[in-house]
Image (cartoon, grey):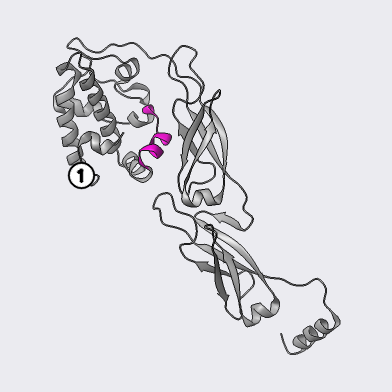
């Protein structure tokens, strides 16, 4: 869901404006004021979820960065409500929920019984049934290429059974990071919610590049005379293009030239890293008699 749309605020809204919008919706659609109204109940749930995200700076930043689909892959319902201050907010509004106040045990939502059991509140309070235990989480390895990381992509993976699930690979994602597919893990043996499927990112080796954060390192061999006198080499990019890069005279062994903005996106900022061209002097293992003589003359000349 679009959390900003659910609260009726712009993406640039301040914390105070977000809180004010949430209060207005929560008061209007609170189940105690709308007994038996399923639409009002749904609006109330959605507003609570939206506020739990947009009132938390870290969750809001993640939502703004990755969008709805990317955020849902990273945060389960439990994660969304963990640490939320909805109980205090409703007390501040002078409202009660469930007749017994707000309990936030276990780090979950203060509305666990309401959300998980599909129950509704009335003047007599909410049901207090405990949800059935969730199924086990499952982790799978997902191999991606540097080209896919550079642009972001969408892959289809096999979940449990024959189910095929589409998953978005965010730009710049790093090896070892996990993408969450909520409810695609093991089923609950007692009829509760299924577990989650986590996709652990692995990066396939690249024939040209070595990754260092958002930078890409590419080695380019040159001859001894090219290193001394200067030359031009071609350097590949992840979009398939090739760039001509001038190697200045006197380039030192192991030195790097920087091609700014030609690397991978940085997940937090979206800015691209660089390509670092590392110069490697290609020393021949065997020389002809003429080459040997020339090198000996250079040695005598102090080179």
Q: Where is residue 38, by image quadrant?
A: top left
Judge whether residue 31 can be spotted in this image: yes
Q: Main secondary structure of the magenta part?
A: helix
Q: Mark 1 = which residue?
A: 14
Residue span colored magenta? 67-78
The residue nearer to you, when weighing 171 against 253, is 171
Residue at the extreme bottom of the image, as rendered: 301
- Residue 101 vertical placement versus 11 (above, below): above
Going 39% across and 53% down the picture, which residue do you hit?
269
The reply, left or right, for residue 157 in relation to residue 45 is right
- Residue 177 vertical placement versus 76 (above, below): below
Number of residue marks: 1
Going 25% across and 13% down the picture, which residue do you hit?
126
SS class of the residue under badge 1?
A: loop
Is residue 301 within the magenta segment? no
User: The C terminus is located in which quarter?
Assistant: bottom right
Q: Position of residue 29 (x, y in %)?
A: 18, 23
């Amino acid at each position: 869901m679009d959390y900003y749309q659910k609260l009726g605020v712009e993406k640039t809204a301040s914390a105070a404006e977000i809180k004010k919008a949430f209060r207005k919706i929560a008061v209007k659609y609170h189940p105690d004021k709308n007994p038996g109204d399923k639409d009002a109940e749904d609006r109330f749930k959605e507003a609570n979820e939206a506020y739990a995200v947009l009132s938390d700076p870290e969750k809001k930043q993640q939502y703004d960065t990755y969008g709805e689909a990317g955020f849902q892959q990273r945060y389960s319902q439990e994660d969304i409500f963990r640490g939320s201050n909805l109980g205090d907010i409703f007390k501040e509004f002078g409202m009660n929920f469930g007749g017994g106040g707000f309990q936030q045990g276990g780090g979950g939502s203060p509305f666990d019984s309401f959300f998980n059991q599909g129950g509704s509140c009335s003047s007599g309070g909410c049901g207090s049934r405990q949800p059935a235990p969730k199924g086990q989480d499952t982790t799978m390895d997902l191999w991606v290429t540097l080209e896919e990381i550079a642009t972001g992509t969408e892959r289809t993976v096999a979940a449990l059974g024959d189910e095929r699930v589409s998953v978005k690979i965010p730009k710049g994602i790093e090896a070892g990071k996990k993408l969450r597919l909520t409810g695609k893990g093991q089923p609950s043996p007692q009829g509760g919610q299924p577990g989650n499927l986590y996709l652990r990112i692995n990066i396939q080796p690249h024939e040209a590049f070595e990754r260092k954060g958002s930078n890409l390192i590419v080695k380019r061999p040159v001859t001894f005379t090219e290193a001394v006198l200067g030359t031009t080499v071609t350097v590949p990019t992840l979009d398939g293009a090739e760039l001509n890069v001038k190697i200045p005279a006197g380039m030192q062994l192991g030195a790097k030239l920087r091609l700014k903005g030609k690397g991978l996106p940085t997940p937090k900022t979206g800015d691209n890293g660089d390509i670092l061209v590392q110069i490697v002097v290609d020393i021949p293992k065997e020389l002809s008699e003429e080459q040997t003589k020339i090198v000996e003359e250079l040695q005598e000349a102090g080179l």
